[in-house]
Image (cartoon, rainbow, N blue to C red):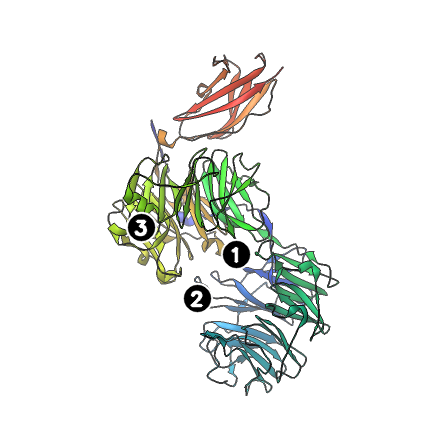
Amino acid sequence: MKIFFIFLITISPLLSQWKEQERPISLYRLNNIASGSDFLVGSLDDPYFSFDNGETWEKRTNGLPEKRGIIEKIIVDNDFIYIKSMSTIINPIEFFYYTKDKGLNWLKVGEYQDYSNSKILRDIKVKNNIIYVLPFSYRSVIKSIDFGETWDTLGLWDKNINYMNYLDVRNDTIVVADAGAFGSAGPVNSGVIVSIDGGKTWEKRNNGLGLGNITCLKIYKNNIFVGNKDGFYFSENFGESYKRAGSIIYNTYLNDIEIIDDTVYIATETGLYKAIDLWKEWVEIPQFKLQRVFEIHYGLNKLFVSASHRNYSNSKSYYSKNLELFDVLRFKKESDLNTFEFNFPNLYFSTENFTGNSIYKIDGFNSENIEITTDYYGESLWNISTYEEIIACKLRPYTNKEPKNRILLSNDLGNTWEIKEILNEQLDIREIFVLNQDSLLLGTKNGLYFSSDLGTNWDLFLTKDSIVNENLSKILNIKKINNKIYLYGDGRILETDKNLTYWKQILTEKSNDFYNEIFDVSKFKNNVFIVSFKGQFIEPSTIDFTRSTDEGKTWENIENRFNDYNDIRFLNVYNIEDYVFVGTTSGVFYSKDNGDSFEEINDGLSNSAMSNGKEFYIYDDKLVYCSGGGIFHRNLEELGITLLVEKTEERNYLYTFPPFPQPTKQEVKISTYWDSALPFTIDDVEIYNLAGIKINTENKLSINKETNYNGHIIWDTSGEQAGIYIVNIKHGTETRTQKVMVEK
């Protein structure tokens, strides 16, 4: 049986854009918290403002470039706000912007300047709207008094000191910290240089300062405070000599320093401390005992702290009015998304948030997100795979010190969960795949593993073909495409069926001299597209976007068919018929000619969505784009796309939920999803008693259809004897059974 659907071209793609599925709202840790006279400002990719002491937050980005990196630093000076981003693949030149109206409009610092020919800024400081910049690999500080329209270069320092990355200024005193470069004997040239004449002359002042790499720096009155990887140092004479703090912070890694009424607070990898006596009397703030404290800031008569557990989980921002007892800062925003699994009609996805992670599902776009796990702290939830009522995902720890051999598994659609440790801690799981009600596959760095009892016992998976087995040993990723399973990894692509009975080699290292690790593949008929990389670092220069039009016999690189491809990192790919959809760090592109040419389709996508592509799916007449920045969809016809979609019995879909209510005396309902390409009627439903006798259901059985693919089977059980009945549902080649208990 074959049914064909044709989507016609009716609307110009220029008149449409992406529509976003509503995302869950999560609590987040806010970075770079700073304050003005009546506001707070912080960052989470974008700048957020609060004018009610942190109760509500507003994102303000007007005037900022679309493609920008994560905000690395925020400075507030006389209610002017300055932000600096870190350099990224998306935007290799760092941006430096300021606002005079609390974020309503952002302006570029030095619109026509190149910060003394440096594209990367190590650090910035602003005092009374005088801007001091520490450029990368430049032996001086540069200064501007007109928001960067013109710059003055201060005096140069010794040419042997060049890796400077921390800066602080007070009156005519300027201190610059050298984090030090690593030599064979450890860090060298680590320390600070000081100018007491406004930067005309510089002197290296390290007497008593440890050699550990400097991590933070602050000037306060006549003191210079320095934090490095082995403790806290302070100078009371502008760096002529230093003393090392002792007591409980000895050999403690410092992240940040704040001073409140002459009391010094330090953020460390092991907690938050304050000094009664800088030399030896330090007090630990108990609430942050053994936590990683990243940032501290005092403003609006409150102390703000960003911290997490040792494994980076439960990462939150806090505030305190009395400097002792801290409450959670309720900064919330739309969740970042991790991984996706499409099992028609449901789309499953996991959220990525250091304060807790969850798995959600939606059963149609613009429908409500349904949470099927409670917040799971400690690890990210990755590589979701589903089959009927089974949901499995990989637990990915936040640090390399924790095991990577654990999965989270539910066999009742998320009502209950269990953690399974697979073999030993040395096993590094890369991908999990649910084959059927009993069987799981794992792609690992140690080969392909198989379980026939839902993860209790595992064996290395082997076939009777030694060549296939050799390629299976390099498999890292597993993906289902059109009812076939594709396994790929280190220069290999293998195709098999859902029963693992046949094996086809699409790409092998030996036959194609292909040595890249493949991290995404898409195949339709004879056309195969892959995204892969070579070397140690994933960056545009190491990424290949490759096409085969003869099912893997020959290959060609096609990344040069994109404008500015040298700055693009390819992320994922999906092809069907002659259409190809590509996610990149510069957004979404598509091709109507099987990859010969591409055009951009980013209208309606946020900056984070454009640069965070994960998956593409076809859902009825929609193209779905899943990214870390959200789930987006648009009608195919709006892109001018005509798809001839062939639905055969090999592609039948049937899913049933448990009957309700149970037990029943009257009507019982079975929520059901079916393949919209095939008719679904009461003729597909038969009911038997335990003796195997078919029950007469004339005028007692009906189907209440809510959409063209889902609804409820309704059976009126009145008049039936008490007992257990079997409901047998057939649809195309698929069959599902459910038990109904009838009582009187």
Q: Identify the mark at residue 399; answer none if there is no mark.
A: 1
User: For the residue labelled by badge 3, is the local secondary structure a helix, a strand or a loop?
Assistant: loop
Q: Position of residue 668 (x, y in %)?
A: 57, 21
Which residue is more in the foreground, 80 or 535?
A: 535
Amino acid bearing label 3: Gly
Q: Is residue 564 visible?
A: no
- Residue at the farthest right position: 322
Amino acid bearing label 2: Pro
User: For the residue labelled by badge 2, is the local secondary structure a helix, a strand or a loop?
Assistant: loop
Mark 2 and 3 residues: CB-CB less than 8 Å, in contact?
A: no
Q: Is residue 36 above or below residue 462?
A: below
Label 3 – label 1 distance at C-alpha: 39 Å
Amino acid bearing label 1: Thr
Left or right, 158 with reference to 539: right
Mark found first going from the N terminus, 2 or 3 = 2
Left or right, 71 with reference to 259: left
- Residue at the farthest front position: 424
Q: Position of residue 671 (x, y in %)?
A: 53, 28
The residue beneath circle 2 is: 92
Which residue is more in the foreground, 221 or 586?
A: 221
